[in-house]
Amino acid sequence: MSDKRVQWFKFASPGNFFALVEKLLPWLWAAAIISTVAGLYIGFFVAPVDYQQGNSYRIMFIHVPAAWMSMFIYFILAVYAFITLVWRIKMADVLAVSLAPTGALFTFAALWTGALWGRPTWGAYWVWDARLTSELLLLFLYLGYMALHAAIPDRQRASRAASLLALVGVVNLPIIYFSVKWWNTLHQGASVSVSKGASMDSRMLAAMLLLSFACWMYAIAVSLTRAQAETLDRERGATWASSLAAAQAKEPEGDVETTGEVPV
């Protein structure tokens, strides 16, 4: 095995993972804040008014990135669930558990903003459209995953049961994505695609891409922050966790110099 691969595998250790996240978080939060401010400014003050929907279309700068992230996070959660079931790597389960609340948040945001967008566009806040219904099912899958993980006292059994549910739920992702093509729905088609490019003004596209990037950075930052807390909870008896707690207790007195290294 090459030295580079060994370097990456070492982050499967809870202590090394915690130290890496500690270094990454300031950069992730900074990127999330800057791109959010820039994206919102372009989307709400620079991008032109849509000739059909007027200013109501601007909610898509929040709705579309949230909808994208709701599906992408679930896919990553399912990958970690698969790793948990097959290789039983503890950090994979930690990351899956940490991603679920963020995925649920983005799914709720997509449904909520979609309802606000639908009222002036369709004349109703909610219709049992194929895409809306499958997106609602995605929210239930996130909530079911979290509830199942919390309901079983034995952590290993809870992990296996929740991971199986996550893998079964993957079948809903292509239904969400292709629902507009497979069924006659009210939901409009994609404005941005890999094959056809973007069918919108460049300023609209810039705002959407910036806010999509902001959602990525936020999702990574908040999930890793949650993963740190989950790791400390699971590894509270480990040497590295005890050393970290002791270092943090002494830090205000100036007795310990923080180096970013965590003993494993």
Image (spheres, rainbow, N blue to C red):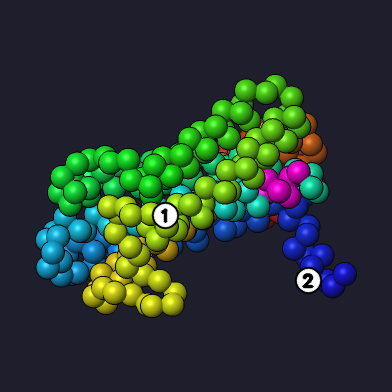
Residue 49 seen in render: no
Do labels 1 and 2 touch, CB within 8 Å?
no
Q: Residue at x 59, y 53 (%)?
A: 76
Residue 233 coordinates in the image, percent (x, y): 67, 33
On the rendered structure, is 168 left or right of 15?
A: left
Residue 182 coordinates in the image, percent (x, y): 42, 57
Tell me which corner region of the image, top left, top right, bottom left or bottom right, holds residue 105: top left
- Reply above or below: 261 against 144: below
Return the residue nearer the eye: 249 or 81: 81
Magenta-span inclusion, residue 82:
yes
Tell me the residue that label 2 is attached to: 4
Count of labels shown?
2
| Majority SS type along the magenta span | helix
Q: Residue at x 29, y 47 (%)?
A: 114
Determine the residue located farthest toward the right in the rendered image.
1
Q: Mark 2 belongs to which amino acid?
A: Lys
Mark 1 or mark 2: which comes first in sequence? 2
- The local secondary structure at tag 1 comes to helix
Magenta-span inclusion, residue 22:
no
Q: Residues within 10 Å of mark 2 (few under 14, many from 20)?
A: few
Residue 79 coordinates in the image, percent (x, y): 65, 52
On the rendered structure, is 145 left or right of 160?
A: left
- Give the magenta part as a residue range: 80-85
Q: On residue 179, which mark appears?
A: 1
Q: Residue at x 19, y 69 (%)?
A: 47
Instruction: Tell me the mark number nearer the camera, choosing from 1 and 2.
Output: 1
Q: Residue at x 71, y 48 (%)?
A: 82
Residue 163 coordinates in the image, percent (x, y): 67, 40
Q: Mark 1 belongs to which amino acid?
A: Ser
The quadrant in which the N terminus is found is bottom right
- Reply above or below: 202 against 190: below
Q: Residues within 10 Å of mark 1 (few under 14, many from 20)?
A: many
